[in-house]
Amino acid sequence: DAGVIQSPRHEVTEMGQEVTLRCKPISGHDYLFWYRQTMMRGLELLIYFNNNVPIDDSGMPEDRFSAKMPNASFSTLKIQPSEPRDSAVYFCASSLTATSSYEQYFGPGTRLTVT
Amino acid sequence: KQEVTQIPAALSVPEGENLVLNCSFTDSAIYNLQWFRQDPGKGLTSLLLIQSSQREQTSGRLNASLDKSSGRSTLYIAASQPGDSATYLCAVNPDTDKLIFGTGTRLQVFP
């Protein structure tokens, strides 16, 4: 398997623009997670899905952030409008319930810079 | 609220040393604990996963232990190499889904 795939790997945008980050989980995995990593706050869970359904979005910082999972192989994290403080590395991860270990596998991340 | 702390925050050692990274968590009710490695500018690579019923896991030169009752885990790296230089993160899984990450230990192994 190719692992978790994220695109783009780097995104530079101006304040106020809409940003869409994409994730393809490992085939067959039924959990998908979005994390954000900053120097100040470390790694934080934003939202996660189980079988395409959002389970916990309490980590989403503001209404400017939204996430969708229209099918088992694709998810998006959208920021509209973007602000400089949104600059961070955004990671997507997936895991498989059936193994009962719930080990999470991470993608390479998207480095977002908002100027 | 579960909090995860890692000590030390940074560590610099000569090649060949055996070393121990520490992770502590405030709530012992966890499902499992994972150790990850992160190279600069890269994603996270899972190193070891310990289920709550287990005491330790080993992979090559790495050994992770778990003492749930005291809220502690250690990652032991034997015969360290420059290629081990990275940030090591521990994360606890409170109830089969979301992970709560520690602050990380930045390791540098010099020749």
Image (cartoon, coloured by chain):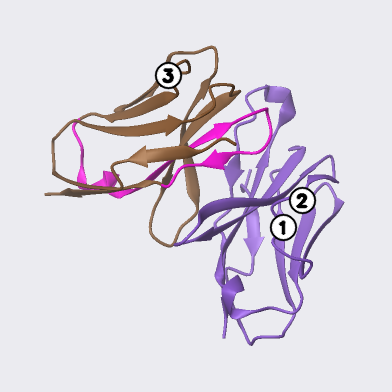
Chain colours: A purple, B brown
Q: Which residue is mark 1?
A: A60
Element under disc 3: loop
Q: Residue at x 74, y 39 (%)?
A: A31
Label 3: few (<14), some (14–19) or many (≥20) C-alpha neighbours in 10 Å: few
Q: Residue at x 55, y 17 (%)?
A: B52
Report if the CB atoms under discs 2 and 1 are less than 8 Å apart.
yes
Viewer-side label of 3, 2: 3
Q: Which residue is mark 2?
A: A57
- Residue A59, given in percent of the width and then of the height, sits at 69, 52
Looking at the picture, does residue A71 appear above or below residue B32? below
User: Which range is magenta?
Assistant: B79-103
Q: Amino acid at mark 3?
A: Ser
Q: Give how far apart the Cα atoms at labels 1 and 3 are.
A: 31 Å
Q: Residue at x 48, y 44 (%)?
A: B45
Report if the CB atoms under discs 1 and 3 are less than 8 Å apart.
no
Name the residue nearer the viewer: B51 or B2.
B2
